[in-house]
Image (spheres, grey):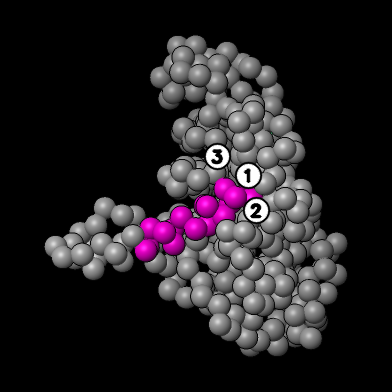
């Protein structure tokens, strides 16, 4: 692997700089190269390329916004032995502590970035001489993403719990509610149905589906670039400020991001007040927050089995009250 890495990165030096842990998905390893220190994620499964391509595209999209710091992506390389590696900038990271407020501000900046681009574009189009399609302003008017992303684990070893690939259908849609209902919730529920065929869940979903549009009355939703998997394990800080990593990006409702953020801890009140000072809570926020958590409960049920069934059903029942 190291010979190939050297070749692909065009570096004469490739010196191990230690094992950086790595999550439960991929092994992590840092190296010194001619152009600086890199962090390499290694996964030996054949599907890893798809997963890393999604992560690379997500990081590239976030970098372009110049809002919140992420490791700069460098390259996805396929290994001759099967599997792939993903090379990115190495960052010295510590647990988030003194930069919570800054993270809140920067996440809001990330979420507002596309809205600002759309406003710029609109202004330009009203200016004489610049018609539609003539602008250099990059703005996205739909919900989705240009590549598939993976929200969840692609384990190194096959494990009977993990019988599916946690791929997200990011096909572009003009409206958020059908996007979220079909391409996020329905997708998870189809997998639950396939694995467990649970009747109570099926019945609750039949009712809940019809109610979803009511949760979105009077809210205007502008596509926002999301990290997509913003739990406490994917945020940290460097010496100069907060950093987020391991994204599964797409353009969606900014509130979706706060779903998983609220589930496993890691975000304090300084984070939330800084975030909401830039993006205030819209009416109906609390209910939608539960609707957004439902996706993650179902995703966890599909990943880890029955332990998350109870939470999934509980949230569905609360939403139906
Ligand atoms: N660019 C980087 N530079 C240095 N260390 C990193 C970098 N990216 C990740 N790490 C370290 O590796 C760990 C795992 O990273 P990451 O979450 O991206 O991997 P993963 O295999 O997708 O794992 P999981 O989602 O299970 O946490 C992080 O918690 C962090 O300590």
Residue 274 badge: 2
Q: Is residue 138 above or below residue 315?
A: above
Are the residues at dot 2 and dot 1 in contact (C-beta closer than 8 Å)?
A: yes
Of residues 275 and 194, the one nearer the viewer is: 275
User: Residue 54 vs residue 285: left or right?
Assistant: left
Whether residue 233 appears in this view of the structure is yes
Q: Compute the Cα span from label 1 to label 3.
A: 11 Å
Q: Position of residue 66 (x, y in %)?
A: 46, 43
Q: Secondary structure at mark 1?
A: helix
Taking the magenta stretch, the answer to whether it contains residue 248 is no
The magenta region covers 103-119
Query: What is the chief secondary structure element of the magenta stretch?
Result: helix
Disc 3: CA contacts within 10 A as few (<14), some (14-19) or many (>=20): many
Q: Position of residue 58 (x, y in %)?
A: 50, 48
**Residue that appears at 55% across and 16% down:** 32
User: Residue 187 vs residue 145: left or right?
Assistant: right
Residue 69 badge: 3
Residue 102 badge: 1
């Amino acid at each position: 692997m190291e010979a190939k890495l050297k070749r692909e990165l065009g570096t004469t030096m490739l010196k191990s700089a230690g094992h950086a842990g790595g999550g439960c998905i991929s092994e992590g390893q840092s190296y010194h190269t001619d152009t600086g220190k890199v962090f390499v994620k290694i996964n030996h499964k054949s599907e890893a390329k798809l997963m890393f391509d999604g992560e690379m595209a997500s990081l590239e999209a976030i970098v372009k916004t110049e809002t919140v710091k992420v490791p700069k992506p460098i390259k996805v390389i396929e290994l001759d032995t099967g599997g792939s590696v993903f090379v990115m900038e190495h960052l010295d990271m510590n647990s988030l502590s003194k930069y919570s407020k800054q993270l809140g501000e920067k996440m809001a900046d990330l979420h507002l970035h596309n809205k600002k681009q759309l406003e710029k574009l609109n202004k330009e189009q009203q200016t004489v001489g610049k018609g539609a399609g003539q602008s250099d302003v990059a703005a996205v008017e739909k919900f989705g993403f240009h590549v598939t992303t993976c929200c969840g684990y692609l384990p190194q070893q096959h494990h009977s719990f993990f019988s599916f690939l946690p791929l997200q259908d990011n096909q572009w849609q003009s409206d958020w509610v059908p996007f979220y209902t079909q391409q996020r919730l329905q997708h998870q529920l189809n997998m639950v149905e396939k694995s467990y065929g649970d009747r109570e869940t099926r019945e609750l979903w039949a009712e809940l589906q019809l109610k979803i549009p009511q949760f979105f009355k009077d809210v205007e939703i502008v596509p926002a670039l999301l990290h997509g998997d913003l739990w406490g394990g994917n945020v940290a800080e460097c010496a100069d400020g907060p950093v987020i990593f391991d994204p599964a990006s797409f353009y969606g409702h900014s509130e979706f991001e706060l779903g998983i953020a609220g589930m496993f801890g890691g975000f304090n009140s300084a984070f939330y007040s800084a975030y909401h000072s830039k993006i205030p809570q819209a009416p109906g926020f609390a209910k939608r927050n539960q609707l957004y958590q439902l996706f993650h409960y179902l995703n966890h049920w599909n990943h880890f089995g029955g332990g998350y069934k109870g939470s999934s059903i509980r949230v569905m029942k609360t939403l139906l009250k």
